[in-house]
Image (cartoon, rainbow, N blue to C red):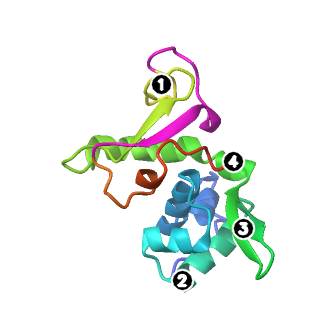
Amino acid sequence: MLGNDYDNQVCCLASALEVVGERWSLLIVRNVLLGLRRFDEIQAQLGIARNVLHTRLTKLLDEGVLEKRLYQEHPPRYEYRLTDKGLDLWPTIVALMQWGNRYAAPAAGVPVLLTHRGCGGAVDGHRICEVCGARLTVRDVRALPGPGASPDHPLQRGAGREPAAA
């Protein structure tokens, strides 16, 4: 078991990895960015054990990456939303996704296309619109299903979802 004591580390990468370095954590953040906000939606899409998902969500809540919002009172039901701290992970998610597009995409093509809401241009590796040159933030970009998106991909249900910050 790896500890989380980084007294000998000089850089903050180890501390950041303690928050989001476990593989399920970034996949949860990705799903919330794609519009899956409820426990059952996230669990079904990831195929993650419920107890593991609960543990990861609790960690992301405790670290201020996610917040819970009540969407139903009787019985109380919550959805998960990204905080500003969580939204700040967007450049990291995009960089990892684009790396995966280059080196690990399915034969059918990339599963997710990122486009600029303003003009429809593609998002480049520096998060700049390839058409108009605008520097883009999470709120400027729409995720659409790409040619490699499976039929059960979250974007197939609601192409062009609004970002999870809303």
Indicate the amino acid at tag 2. Answer: Arg
* Mark 1 or 4, nearer chain start: 1
The answer to if 105 sits in the magenta stretch is no
Q: Position of residue 16 (x, y in %)?
A: 62, 57
Residue 4 in sight = no
Q: In the image, what residue type sits under mark 3?
A: Leu
- Mark before the other along the chain sequence, 4 or 2: 2
* Mark 3 to mark 1 CA distance (whole Å): 33 Å
Quadrant assignment, res 98: top left
Q: CA distance from mark 1 to mark 4?
A: 20 Å
In this view, the mark in front (1 or 4): 1
Residue for badge 1: 120
Instruction: Identify the element where label 4 is drawn.
Output: loop
Q: Position of residue 51 (x, y in %)?
A: 56, 85
Residue 74 lies, in percent from the top left, at: 79, 80
Q: Earlier in the sequence, mark 2 or mark 1?
A: 2
The image shows residue 110, relative to residue 137, as above or below, that is: below
Please report the residue visible at 63 percent of the width from the left and 63 percent of the height from the top.
Answer: 19
**Left or right, 133 with reference to 151:** right
- Please say if the residues under marks 4 and 3 sit with CB atoms less than 8 Å apart: no
- Dots 3, 2 in contact, CB < 8 A: no
* Residue 61 circle label: 3
Relative to residue 38, is residue 166 drawn left or right? right
Q: Nearer the viewer, residue 120 or 72?
A: 72
Sequence-wise first label, 3 or 2: 2
Mark 4–mark 3 Cα distance, whole angstroms, equals: 15 Å
Dots 1, 4 in contact, CB < 8 A? no
Of mark 4 and mark 3, the one earlier in the sequence is 3
